[in-house]
Amino acid sequence: MHTEIQLKNELRIRRESEWLCRGVPFPQGALTDVSALSLQDESGGQQTLATEALGHWPDGSVKWALLQFPVSFEHNGSRTLTLHWPRAGAGDKSGSTINLSKFETEWEVNNGRLTFRLPMSGQALLTRLQANGTPVAHDIRAQVQDESGVTFTGELNSEPAIEHLTDKMLVISRRGIHRDVDGNKYFSFVFRLTVFADADDIEVEYQFVHDEPFRHAPPPAQIIQGVGSQTIDTDHPGMRELRSVRLVLRHGIDSPTEYVTCPLCTVDEVGLVRSAEPMRILLTQAPKIGLYDAMIDGEVLVGDKRIGTSHGWVGLSDGARGLSASVRSFGQQWPKGITANAHDVVIELWPESAGPLHIYQGQAKTHGVKLRAFDGPTSQVRLPDWHFAYQFPIVLSAPQWYIGSGAVGSVFHYQPEKYPGIERRFRLEFEQFLGHDRLLGMMDYGDYESLGEASWGRRGNFMSNLEHDFAQAVWLQFVRTGSYRYMDYFDAGVRHVLDVDIVHFDDQDDQIGGWRVHGSLHAAPDCDLSHSWAESLVSHYYYTGYTPSLAAARGVADWMVRRIEHDGQGRIGARDRGWPLIALSTVYQATRDALYAQAAKKIVESFTDGPDPLEANGGLSGGYGPIPFQQAVMGSIAATGLAYYHQTFGGKPSRHLFLTICDWLCSDAVLGRDGLYEAMPGNETSMAYAAYSNFRESLGYAWELTGDTKYVVVGVRDMADNMASTVPTGSVGPPLTVKYGYEVVCATGTRMSTFWRENLRFMSHADKAGLLQDF
């Protein structure tokens, strides 16, 4: 058997032997052993390939395989490779392999070109980085400054944990805490390292975690007027300040004669590299969508500054050997700074000049930095291109294969010729989102504002915390299109959730692993079953192999298990059942942990066996929540949860309950005053959405189960009304008064997170049923 995979290089640069690590799904029963896979190029030549199994189907066959292989491009464009199983030929076994040697006080890693040491303890996170036996870096250390200016340096306190190890790739993580000279602790950290065979660069990740206790008893929760969402003030006892956060690289270039850097930085008369001006000021002057485009084109100017040219890197050389450092998403995560001199490269992840960073208990932040060793002067190694390649990874996609495998569920195939209006709407919505809602900044990047003021640090703002699992909605769009833009935001969104929205530490309540309800500073005093998701985390793990994503998904599921045990069967509402059923079913499929199956079963047993499965919580016709949503929305979330449960575990009770709710959703009982399935009345808030509901995903599965087209007919009717009431414009603008008289802010992330998620699945069913029409 075989399938083709497409690789895309969006950059107008040459890429040589650049390692790619991506997941590919397989239909149930198609592949039993990843070692049977081989990869061929366009001419039939065998490619170097290492593989791992990331997930399995119930029959034990491989569901997702992680592929690791080097790729070259002469310029921008596409390539098509063919994946075979069983092997078509012996495969390319040339090149070096990863060699890991373990000693009592340190581990040594050799990839065939680079060697380095990982100490078992101490402040140095990595030591003795050498290229072909020549030193290029002595060590790396992490430092934070507290609000009074005391410096705390990271110290390792655990053995290395191997996350991935194949012949061609090694990923190791370390944990530790920051201590001052007197041994006092301030914040913990995680240090992660990724290296590929024969590569001349390595990637390090550094995550600091606020795990400090509350200063005193928490105050009463504050409420934002008219929104009903809790907000956190900067003087909250769970809030701490950081003056600065930095990585200090003590390089091994003894007498550098060359310093080079990006246009956002400068080299002074003595070779000192500094940031040119505060990144926050520079980037807030630029159009957000212009900044995005400039990352590829490099043509957008702010004054005399070209902000699109590769930014966030520095290189130094003595003419014979050199070292370069590149920060992932340097500009998007302002403020930032880089300083280099004859001894050190200091990467200011949060410069002291930016003012204090307020961070709430349990939040974290991860940065990626790639280090490259090279021979000769800097002018011969095209460092800007190398940095650019790090910012814009090669895209691997195979839309027909991914959807056809069944591993991503039902997804609407990309059909611009058949449905040009629908596809245009999706494209325009995302473009407007990039220009209007998407946020930049160290703690905001990957999220979007919702129903309030923007910008990290203001009081009274309303951060979405990726409500409705927005990253999963973008993932579905990427699966069907293979477009870089969707992959880029999917990755940024998940990484934001992993750091900022999921609770890493809590000494007040049992919230660790939960997902914070939306609120200012991305924080709220509580987590809730109605605002926690895991699908995007599992999808991210399957596509990238990034183990923190799966660990976080398990953390969400573990928190749900504890919460369900605490709340009991009769104390959770409709959406408090639906979202956990979706999450628990998803994480169970990824882990086969019976604990999640048992918790999901308890939720199903909490539904009432009768004409109204939600009778114990106000009934299908009752209102719910701080904003009087129509119960159709909440009931449909419960129905979708039951659909996921039935798809995962089967069983007559879940099927019966599911179809009972779907039949109610198809009745006139759920119609609003305009004959629409409303989610939020037009006079409720300043950002009202007409015909905005979540039930079409459940109706599509009801049609799949029964073959009754009434479910698709109702879903298509509501979808058409929805699109008519919120038609996107060609540019970003103020709220519009549209067909039904409601004021609608076009293409906000909250609307997209629900509209995309449900319709990208429902449209697949409607298309198969022959009832989908373009508009």
Image (cartoon, rainbow, N blue to C red):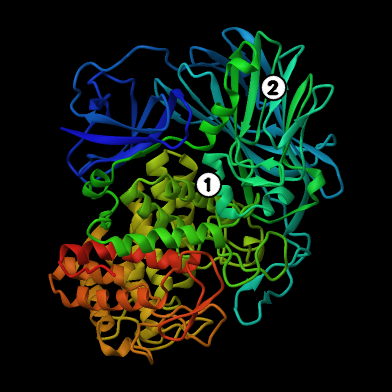
The residue lying at 65 percent from left, 64 percent from top is 454
Determine whether 465 is above or below 33 in the image: below
Q: Secondary structure at mark 1?
A: helix
- Horizontal side of residue 384 vs 651, given as left or right: right
**Which residue is at the far left?**
707
In front here: 221 or 224?
Answer: 224
Q: Position of residue 101 (x, y in %)?
A: 51, 15
Q: Secondary structure at mark 2?
A: strand
- Horizontal side of residue 594 vs 135, given as left or right: left
Q: Earlier in the sequence, mark 2 or mark 1?
A: 2
**Which residue is at the far right?**
148
Mark 2 closeness class: few <14, some 14–19, many ≥20 residues within 10 Å: many
> Label 2 belongs to which residue?
139
Query: Marks 2/1: CA distance?
Result: 36 Å
- Amino acid tagged 2: Asp
> Label 1 belongs to which residue?
293
User: Can residue 37 be seen here?
Assistant: yes
Q: Position of residue 475 (x, y in %)?
A: 39, 52
- Amino acid tagged 1: Asp
- Horizontal side of residue 7 vs 711, given as left or right: right
In front here: 152 or 114?
Answer: 114
User: Can residue 644 be seen here?
Assistant: no
Q: Position of residue 231 (x, y in %)?
A: 67, 70
The residue lying at 80 percent from left, 41 percent from top is 184
Determine whether 167 is above or below 617 in the image: above
In front of the other: label 2 or label 1?
1
| Quadrant occupied by the C terminus | bottom left
